[in-house]
Image (cartoon, rainbow, N blue to C red):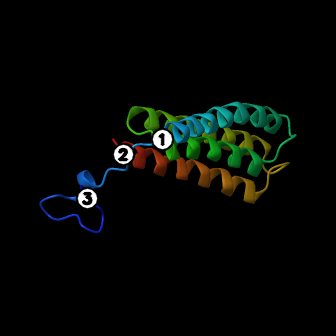
Amino acid sequence: MATAATATAAEPCATACAPAPRSPALSASASARIAAAKKLRPLVYARFQSGGATLPEYLATSELEFRATRDSGIVGPELVAAASEYIASMRKALELVKLRYPRVASDEDLARAEYAVAEGEYWLEDAKSRR
């Protein structure tokens, strides 16, 4: 099998350099990360809605969930679904920030939420290419 350093034109790295299979322990750890992040995000969102959590806290928690999924090695429709869920979550956060702006939310909050949506759109396009 070729490595990134030894791939040739006849054997491009994109197909010849597939990652080694994950150990059962690593797969279990990846699944645990995803489950923990999926459990945490709605809890932080509930606090965010009521003003008990900050926007950066919620954005970070949502990002953890997507990154845990992506880092687990999941590709294809499941990764696309995770990216789509992230975007939907970020759009909800942006709408909430807009409702609170300028009374409670700041220009920085608005910019952070807009960035999170743009980042989600990027991640979705990237996920579509990782089939």
Residue 14, percent across and down?
A: 27, 55
Q: Which residue is identified by label 2?
A: 130
Q: Is residue 82 left or right of residue 48?
A: left
Assess whether mark 1 and mark 3 are in contact (beta carbons under 8 angstroms).
no
Give neighbour class at mark 2: few <14, some 14-19, many 20+ (Cα, 10 Å). some
Crowd rating for badge 3 (residues with CA inside 10 Å; few <14, some 14–19, many 20+): some
Sequence-wise, the earlier of marks 1 and 2 is: 1
- Along the viewing direction, whichever of 40 and 4 lies nearer the viewer: 4
Badge 1 crowding class, 10 Å Cα cut-off, few under 14, some 14 to 19, many 20 or more, is few
Q: Is residue 13 left or right of residue 56?
A: left
Circle 2: element type: loop
Residue type at mark 1? Ser
Instruction: Kindly identify which numbered label has been placed on residue 13.
Output: 3
In the picture, the quarter occupied by the C terminus is top left
Tell which tag, 3 or 1, sits nearer the viewer: 1
Give the mark nearer the N terminus: 3 vs 2.
3
Task: Assign the N terminus to one quadrant of the image.
Answer: bottom left
Q: Amino acid at mark 2?
A: Arg
Q: Are marks 3 and 2 in contact (CB under 8 Å)?
A: no
Q: Quadrant of residue 26?
A: top right
Furthest residue toward left:
10
Please report the residue visible at 37 percent of the width from the left and 50 percent of the height from the top: 19
Q: Give the label on residue 23, or none.
A: 1
Q: Amino acid at mark 3?
A: Cys
- Give the mark nearest the N terminus, 3 or 1: 3
Q: Give the number of callouts.
A: 3
Between the residue at mark 3 and the residue at mark 2, the CA separation in whole angstroms equals 14 Å
- Which residue does the image show at 73% across and 35% down from the upper left? 40
State how far apart marks 3 and 1 are (Cα): 22 Å
x and y percentages locating residue 121 in the rendered image: 48, 47
